[in-house]
Amino acid sequence: MYFIDYHNKYLSTFAAIIIHEMSHILVSIAKGRKLYCVRIFIIGINAIFCEDYKDTDSFLINIAGPLSNILISLMCVLMSTYYLPKSDNMRFFILTNIFLAIFNMLPVLPLDGGRIFRDILSSKVGLYKAHKYSRRVSKGLGLLIILIGIIQLHDNIYNFSLIFLGGYIFYCLKYDESEVYFMNIKNLVYKRSRFLRKGVYPGRELVVLKNMRLRDVVKNMDFDRFHIIYVLDENMRLLKIFTEQEIIDNMAKFNGEMTFDELINSMN
């Protein structure tokens, strides 16, 4: 970038990304999350936190980045209009912030818009279904971005940025599939502290057959409901009633592959 005289635009882009990520970090810290480390890359920074945050805070954390880019672009427009002379670098910096905000609000994982979209679905259909639907939307838009990138190559054979972004989306989707199971377990574990703090919590009942595995039931649990599980045999007779916490405790004691029939027999 230095030799092709693109370093000014690179620095402007890097600055916009730093503003974006620092907004996520500052809002996360303000919401009580403890910072574990910050990793610096040639295309930006990435922060890792030690603790989970409350569900109501996730929207504020995710929206902070795009909002900061919009606010910075508005400030720069005002400064260039009334205080500073207009320049190509300033115009490029303003457009970079606007495009970065718009792109990050696409409902595509792992972008901010994708996380917000998944959180909204989670409150309606649960974490597993929300993750499944979010992945489908992300794959569809990822393919669309790659297709537009291929069309773009006809105008400029060296501009493969959209193809790279589409590939990056599929790369991230490949490695985040297993995370949703542990995310759901973590949300269920943290639910106890939320329950004790509030003193009252909405409930939900699930009815399962005795040959179902424990981990399959967890997939159908919602993070914002406390569950009572009724276990039936093949004749639809009630065998046992479990609470959500009992399921989690037995998964920790045994494993998620155990069926309810095996669990009931081990308790006799």
Image (tube, helix red, strand yellow):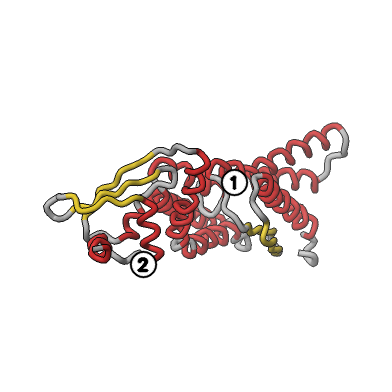
- Mark 2 to mark 1: distance in Å? 34 Å
- Residue 22 in the image, given as x and y percentages of width and height: 71, 51
Task: Give the residue displayed 48% in from the left and 56% down from the top.
Answer: 186
Where is residue 79? Give x, y as percent: 83, 36
Q: Is residue 73 left or right of residue 86?
A: left
103 or 63: which is nearer to us?
A: 63
Residue type, numbered disc 2: Asn
Q: Nearer the viewer, residue 147 or 187?
A: 187
**Residue behind mark 2:** 255
The label on residue 226 is none
Whether residue 154 is visible: no
Q: Residue furthest front?
A: 268
Q: Which mark is residue 62?
A: 1
Q: Earlier in the sequence, mark 2 or mark 1?
A: 1
Q: State the image coordinates of residue 62 (x, y, percent, origin top left).
A: 59, 46
Q: Residue at x 44, y 43 (%)?
A: 224
Secondary structure state at the residue bearing disc 2: loop
